[in-house]
Image (cartoon, rainbow, N blue to C red):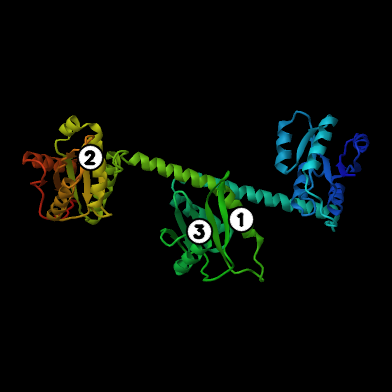
């Protein structure tokens, strides 16, 4: 015979208890929610039926309390309330109730009882909890449980707000600023899987040791570069507790892992606060990481020419504006190359547009391979390409352009019949000068490129007005 604990302050409680006994249940009933909690914790029943709204302690509070106690965490709870209240049904489910039943429906209550008991795990024998302080102890436990739920809710809200960061680097920086305020740590690390990224926040004095410990905790290979946030917010401690780590999930997907190098435990005991905090962060961080990844990919696609994989015109202009700003501020000169594929229209007409696209795709691979990582390569439009070389000497830039011209001439492309297609390019070179705009610099490189075409194509021409070296900044008139 299953024992049912009925907690109901209404005058019809005894009638409901009799109906349940007729169904074969042993019923223990009370009108007081505090007494009901004592009965449930001291001798856990097979199932609990409680009214949603009761004076003093609500069914929601009772349900949350019993869910948080080891003695009753697996005991099914059915809450009863107004028949058509969707709001009450929602809160009952969120509080952990196995079912929500309207007060006037005995049939629904019996069906919910049978289903809950059939699915309930076996009861543990002899395990109980005693509330030593009576109703005061009960209210303190409810208050502590509500405080914990409120804290989790605030933490979750802060983590979800990271979805506006836009990039993974900024997201991690902001995350570390928040987490270090609520939990002191030696280091914090996040490892995302697709794309693979690894970020660490640590004290500057312990950067290397923190990276080694974080890689070991998250199992990150040494060939994955680390993005570091270094400041004195992290604890200046070389050793501490065993790192805490949690999987970052979103639905059924695991997006990465997060780990924390906790500080040395106080009084030899590692507090549960950090572990609970990590679980909440890991549970909520998946959404912001997914949003940041999608925004980064969207921004990347907005900057990349889809055929060649190089920067598009708008992105290249933005990069040029940054280069010009460095020139004006620090005197860091550079040279611009503008190249045009020779006879590209005839190539498309004779061999087909698919072959023309193949030529452009080969250039998308060849051009970056001919320059340094600090140089910028883009597709200007059609068969025109631009390269910003971080070289101040125009003569050296022209020599690099000649290397690029030769590499283009060595490209092997075949048309649909298998016949080889000759690929050459004419390249114009111009050096950036103080006071230049992007348009002025491109115009000089464009004139040099047309001079190269006029000279017979497949060659490099330096703009005739280019000085042998970057001239001194013009004197400012005040």
* Residue linked to disc 1: 277
Task: Please provide percent x and percent y for residue 98.
Answer: 75, 41
Task: Please provide percent x and percent y for residue 376.
Answer: 26, 49
**Residue at horizontal 25 percent and vertical 34 percent from the top:** 354
> Would you say 207 lies left or right of 87 here?
left
Q: Quadrant of the N terminus?
A: top right
Q: Residues within 10 Å of mark 3 (few under 14, many from 20)?
A: many
> Would you say 261 lies left or right of 55 here?
left
Q: Is residue 266 above or below residue 1?
A: below
Q: Is residue 354 above or below residue 165?
A: above
Task: Please provide percent x and percent y for residue 140.
Answer: 77, 54
Q: Nearer the viewer, mark 2 or mark 3?
A: 2
Q: Residues within 10 Å of mark 1 (few under 14, many from 20)?
A: some
Verify CB contact (< 8 Å) between mark 3 and mark 1: no
Q: Is residue 264 above or below residue 275?
A: below
Q: Secondary structure at mark 3?
A: strand
- Closer to the camera, 102 or 192? 192
- Closer to the camera, 124 or 58? 124
Q: Secondary structure at mark 2?
A: helix
- Closer to the camera, 413 or 227? 413
> Would you say 201 lies left or right of 432 here?
right
Q: Does residue 396 appear in the picture of this structure?
A: yes
* Residue linked to disc 3: 189
Q: Nearer the viewer, mark 3 or mark 1?
A: 3
Q: Secondary structure at mark 1?
A: helix
**Residue at horizontal 87 percent and vertical 48 percent from the top:** 35
Label drawn at residue 359: 2
């Amino acid at each position: 015979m299953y024992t049912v604990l009925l907690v109901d302050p209404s005058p019809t409680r005894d009638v409901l208890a009799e109906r349940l006994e007729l169904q074969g249940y042993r019923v223990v009933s009370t009108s007081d929610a505090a007494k009901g909690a004592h009965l449930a914790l001291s001798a856990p029943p097979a199932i609990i039926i409680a009214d949603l709204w009761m004076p003093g302690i609500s069914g929601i509070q009772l349900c949350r309390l019993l869910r948080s106690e080891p003695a009753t965490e697996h005991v099914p709870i059915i809450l009863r309330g107004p028949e058509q209240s969707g709001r009450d049904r929602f809160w009952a489910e969120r509080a952990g109730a196995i079912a929500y039943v309207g007060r006037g429906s005995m049939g629904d209550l019996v069906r919910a009882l049978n289903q809950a008991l059939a699915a309930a795990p076996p009861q543990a024998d002899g395990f109980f909890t005693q509330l030593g302080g009576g109703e005061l102890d009960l209210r303190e436990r409810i208050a502590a449980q509500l405080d914990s739920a409120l804290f989790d809710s605030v933490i979750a809200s802060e983590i979800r707000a990271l979805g506006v960061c836009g990039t993974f680097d900024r997201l991690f920086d902001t995350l570390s600023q928040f987490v270090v305020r609520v939990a002191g740590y030696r280091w914090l690390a996040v490892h995302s899987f697709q794309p693979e990224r690894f970020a660490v926040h640590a004290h500057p004095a312990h950067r290397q040791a923190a990276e080694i410990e974080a890689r070991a905790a998250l199992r990150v290979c040494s060939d994955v570069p680390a993005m570091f946030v270094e400041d004195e917010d992290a604890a200046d401690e070389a050793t501490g507790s065993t790192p805490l780590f949690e999987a970052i999930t979103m639905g059924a997907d695991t997006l990465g892992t997060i780990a924390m190098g906790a500080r040395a435990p106080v009084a030899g005991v590692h507090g549960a606060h950090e572990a609970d905090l990590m679980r909440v962060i890991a549970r909520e961080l998946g959404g912001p990481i997914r949003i940041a990844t999608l925004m980064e990919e969207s921004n990347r696609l907005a900057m990349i020419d889809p055929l060649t994989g190089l920067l598009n015109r708008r992105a290249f202009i933005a990069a040029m504006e940054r280069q010009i700003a460095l020139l004006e501020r620090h005197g860091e000169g550079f040279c611009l190359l503008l190249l045009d594929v020779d006879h590209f229209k005839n190539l498309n007409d004779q061999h087909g547009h698919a072959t023309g696209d193949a030529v452009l795709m080969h250039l998308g691979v060849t051009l970056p391979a001919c320059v340094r990582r600090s140089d910028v390569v883009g597709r200007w439009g059609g068969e025109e390409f631009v390269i910003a070389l971080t070289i101040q000497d125009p003569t050296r830039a022209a020599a690099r352009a000649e290397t690029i011209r030769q590499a283009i001439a060595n490209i092997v492309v075949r048309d649909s019949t298998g016949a080889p297609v000759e690929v050459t390019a004419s390249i114009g070179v111009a050096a950036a000068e103080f006071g230049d705009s992007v348009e002025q610099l491109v115009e000089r490189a464009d004139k040099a490129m047309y001079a190269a075409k006029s000279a017979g194509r497949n060659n490099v021409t330096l703009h005739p007005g280019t000085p042998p070296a970057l001239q001194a900044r013009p004197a400012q008139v005040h």
